[in-house]
Structures are given as structure tokens and as C-alpha cells.
Image (spheres, rainbow, N blue to C red):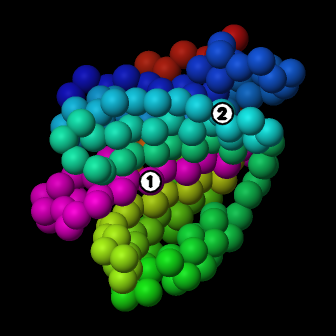
Amino acid sequence: MKILVLVLVIILAACSSTSNKSEFKAENLIQKFPLPEGDWDVHQREPEGTNMLETRWVSKTSDDLAQTFVMYNTPNGDPQRTMDSDHKVGKKNCDILFQSDLVSNEVQNGYPQLTWQSECKSSNGYYSKTIHKTISGNDSQYAFKRIFKSKPSDESWQLWLSYASSIEVCDSRSNQHPCPEGYKKVE
């Protein structure tokens, strides 16, 4: 699989009209492309009044989603708080079943991160099984979700868990958070 680097920070800097573009040049979200499995339509938006960039991939063959969020100006966020907030929403909306399990809480490339999985069933017929990952950077907070709207095969689930584990943050300003080999420093 050819690996491309998604540098959402650069995309935002090139496309955004915000006044703080230059603040985020050195810390970058690294995500492999193309996404595993299937064909996807991609949409990107920065909701008005937020310092957030959402990239959303919608499957062309199902209702499944993948999402990446960059929450700017949220230095040293708390991944546990993000997971706790997700649990609160899940417990409220998933009245038949809400189950969540921690997958990984290891520091990754010098940054705190949490990866967890959740499953939801509600009385209105909604079902999802989701892989979540949140990384707390020094400049921003980053999140990834892969949402299956029907029960995935074990093979597909493992493929996406592996994909989520490969998502990382690097900082071209710091040897503590090195960028992958072949990655060029933002200038």
C-alpha cells in the first residue's frame, strides 16, 4: 500500500482564513492513505465559530464512516476526558447496549493517547461499533473514529485497529516527537 502523509495542519493553513495559521506549522497529524478497505467520498469542513477541522470519509457502499478531527488551540488536552465524554453520550443514547473497552493507553511518539472501542444498540434500531483514538499534542488535540453501522468481520475489525494504531502526531521542531523517515519539515 502506498503511504501518503496527511498533514491536516498544512491543509488548514492553505485553505483557512483564520488569523492564526502560522501557529501550527510544526505539529502534524500523520495518517496513511488510502484508507483500508473500500471506496470513500471525502469531505472536509471547519465548523463556523470553532477551532476544529473535521475530515469525514463516507463509504460508497455502506453507511460506514471514518472521521479525523483536529482541535486547534487545545494544548496538552486530556485523552481520558475525551473518552469519558464519549462514554457519557453512549450511555445516554444507547439504551439497549453500550459497551466500551480500552485498547491502548501507551504513549505514542512522546504524546499521550487513548484508543478504545465501543458498541451501541438503541431501541430506535441504531447500531454502531466504533474504534476511537485521541492524541493530545502540545499545540492541538487530535481524534480519529471508524464507525461501522453493522457488525464488522473480525478481519475487517483487526485491519482497522491496526490502521488506527498507525495514526500518530509528530513535531518537526522537536527530537522528542520525530516525524517519520521521509517526512519533510514544514518551513
In the current view of this chain or complex, which residue is farthest to the right?
19
Q: Could you tell me the amino acid type at mark 1? A: Lys
Q: In which quadrant is the C terminus drawn? A: top right
Q: Which residue is mark 1?
A: 145
In the current view of this chain or complex, which residue is farthest to the bottom?
96
Q: Position of residue 155 (x, y in %)?
A: 13, 58
Number of numbered discs visible in the structure rendering: 2
Q: Position of residue 8 (x, y in %)?
A: 57, 28
Q: Which residue is mark 2?
A: 46
- Please identify, in this view, whether the residue under mark 2 or under mark 1 is nearer the observer: 2
Q: Nearer the viewer, residue 129 or 82?
A: 129
Q: Could you tell me the amino acid type at mark 2? A: Glu
Q: Secondary structure at mark 1?
A: strand
Position of residue 58 relative to residue 136, above or below, is above
Segment tinted magenta in the rendering: 138-163
Q: Residue at x 86, y 21 (%)?
A: 19
Q: Secondary structure at mark 2?
A: loop
Q: In which quadrant is the N terminus drawn? A: top left
Position of residue 168 relative to residue 44, above or below, is below
